[in-house]
Amino acid sequence: MTLPATALHTDIAALLPRLRRFARAITWNREDADDLVQVAIERAIGRAGQWQAGTRLDSWIFRIMKNAWVDEVRARMRRDRIMVPAEAGEHVGDESAEAQQQRMAIQKAMSMLSHDHRVVIGLVLVDGLAYKEAADVLDIPMGTLTSRLARAREMLQGLLSDQARTV
């Protein structure tokens, strides 16, 4: 049983802030994130018949988004393109200099993590999904998610410590 199209569209629209936040966590580029959200929504609406009422709509769309990003990265690799990092000065004047430097350090450290580690951090730490939900989105066992998250946190802390020592 599926929801009527207008109800599904309303539910998807309510998820837009979370979808955009997750997209920014895995792409680290505002334009790529916006494109990724658009692609995910288009795919979700086009495949609305595959979603079943009573299951988590957010997890279903997060999985669509993750798969769309994997497709995009693979396509870029085939075209021998390099992903452009987020521009360092996109929020100049919005924050204090110290907060700006901290944000840039976190972005740099996140960009140095593997794709798998960025994704688990994006789902669990940025978007706040429960471990079970994140494991479902990534289609991996819970133990794999927890060990991947632990390694990602450890690597992120190490990278941030190394950056602090060099400053």
Image (cartoon, rainbow, N blue to C red):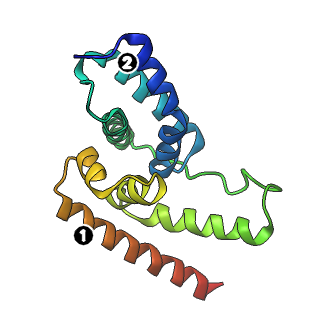
> Could you classify mark 1 by the number of other residues whose Cα lies within 10 Å: few (under 14), some (14-19), or many (20 or more)?
few
Q: Which three-letter amino acid code belongs to the residue tagged 2?
A: Ile
Residue farthest along the right direction in this orientation: 93
Evaluate if marks 1 and 2 touch, with contact meaning CB atoms under 8 Å apart: no
Please provide percent x and percent y for residue 79: 38, 38
Q: State the SS at label 1.
A: helix
Please provide percent x and percent y for residue 61: 36, 33
> Could you classify mark 2 by the number of other residues whose Cα lies within 10 Å: few (under 14), some (14-19), or many (20 or more)?
some
Residue 122 versus residue 47 in the image, above or below: below
Please provide percent x and percent y for residue 65: 37, 36
State the residue at coordinates (60%, 83%): 164
Q: Image check: 48 left or right of 109?
A: left
Residue farthest along the front direction in this orientation: 54
| 1 or 2: tag closer to the N-terminus | 2
State the residue at coordinates (37%, 42%): 73
The N terminus appears in which quarter of the rendering? top left
Between residue 35 and residue 56, name the one nearer to us: 56
Residue 78, disc: none
Disc 1 marks which residue? Answer: 147
Residue 23 versus residue 110 in the image, above or below: above
Q: Image check: 16 left or right of 143?
A: right
Quarter where residue 3 is shown:
top left
State the residue at coordinates (65%, 70%): 102
Q: Which three-letter amino acid code belongs to the residue tagged 1?
A: Ser
State the residue at coordinates (31%, 39%): 63
Q: Image check: 69 left or right of 137?
A: right
The C terminus appears in which quarter of the rendering? bottom right
Disc 2 marks which residue? Answer: 45
